[in-house]
């Protein structure tokens, strides 16, 4: 190896530092620099991310433009799942990041709060479903989760069905959260009792 740093991964985080001069870093990518520059390479196994921080301009490849001075670039070798990315982006200091965790003690798991666009740090963010007005209501959800959302109804809290509610086009509320309007079938309004729930799977 001519002018480079090789980092061996051990544990969740490994940091290597060194100077990179003229020459090629092993692999498919050539890093050419003159004079030598200081670099720090951080490997985060938990988040599957690699971050390269450079102390001054460095050209990546013979025909590429130089990085800014100084520069940091992060690449994921696999994309984190949407739930983990949501937590790491919006609530990096959350005490319990497990899907089944409930750090704010409101009875909603972290995964449920993610699915329905709620805040896992405060119990005030609890109910994503609006009151029923006539045959219409709405619920909030996090955008682009890839989850399947269903609206269920029951007249006795024992038997549940999902075939008499229409979900209309979602409207963005900002911050990665959207509101979904729901219209119930007219036949449900004649029931003496009606119970509704929304699930995300």
Image: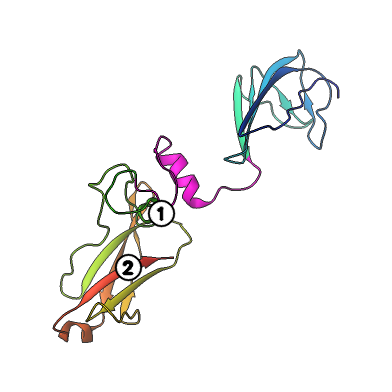
Q: Magenta includes 90?
A: yes
Q: Tell me: residue 155, above or below residue 178.
A: below
Q: Is residue 79 left or right of residue 129?
A: right
Please identify the quadrant where the N terminus is shown.
Answer: top right
Q: Residue furthest left?
A: 192
Residue occupying image coordinates x 50% and y 51%: 82
Residue occupying image coordinates x 18% and y 65%: 131
Q: Identify the image quadrant of residue 134.
A: bottom left
Circle 2 or circle 1, nearest the eye? 1
Q: Sequence-wise, which precedes: disc 2 or disc 1?
A: 1
- The span from disc 2 to disc 1 (Cα, nearest Å) is 14 Å
Which element is circle 2 on?
A: strand
Within 10 Å of disc 1 (Cα), the crowding (few <14, some 14-19, many 20+) is: many
Q: Could you say which disc has been placed on residue 159 in the image?
A: none
The magenta-colored residue range is 76-102
Q: Identify the image quadrant of residue 121.
A: top left
Q: Is residue 113 left or right of residue 83?
A: left
Q: Position of residue 44 (x, y in %)?
A: 61, 35
Residue sitting nearer the eye, 118 or 109? 109
Residue occupying image coordinates x 68% and y 20%: 39
Q: Could you say which disc has been placed on residue 111 in the image?
A: 1
Q: Position of residue 143 (x, y in %)?
A: 41, 55
Q: Main secondary structure of the magenta part?
A: loop
Q: Position of residue 88 (x, y in %)?
A: 46, 40
Q: Could you say which disc has been placed on residue 198 in the image?
A: 2
């Amino acid at each position: 190896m001519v002018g480079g740093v090789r980092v061996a991964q051990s544990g969740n985080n490994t940091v290597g530092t060194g100077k990179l001069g003229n020459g090629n870093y092993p692999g498919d990518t050539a890093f050419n620099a003159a004079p030598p520059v200081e670099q720090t390479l951080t490997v985060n196994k938990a988040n599957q991310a690699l971050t390269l921080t450079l102390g001054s301009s460095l050209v990546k490849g013979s025909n590429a433009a130089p990085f800014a001075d100084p520069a940091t670039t992060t690449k994921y070798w696999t994309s984190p799942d949407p739930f983990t990315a949501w937590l790491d982006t919006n609530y990096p200091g959350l005490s319990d990041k497990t899907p089944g965790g409930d750090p704010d003690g409101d009875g909603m798991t972290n995964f449920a709060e993610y699915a329905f666009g709620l805040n896992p740090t405060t119990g005030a963010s609890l109910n994503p479903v609006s009151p029923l007005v006539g045959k219409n209501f709405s619920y909030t959800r996090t955008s682009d989760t890839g989850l399947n959302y269903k609206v269920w109804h029951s007249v006795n809290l024992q038997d549940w069905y999902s075939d008499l509610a229409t979900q209309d086009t979602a409207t963005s509320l900002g911050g990665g959260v959207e509101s979904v309007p729901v219209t119930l079938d007219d036949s449900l309004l004649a029931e003496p009792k009606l119970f509704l729930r929304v699930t995300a799977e």
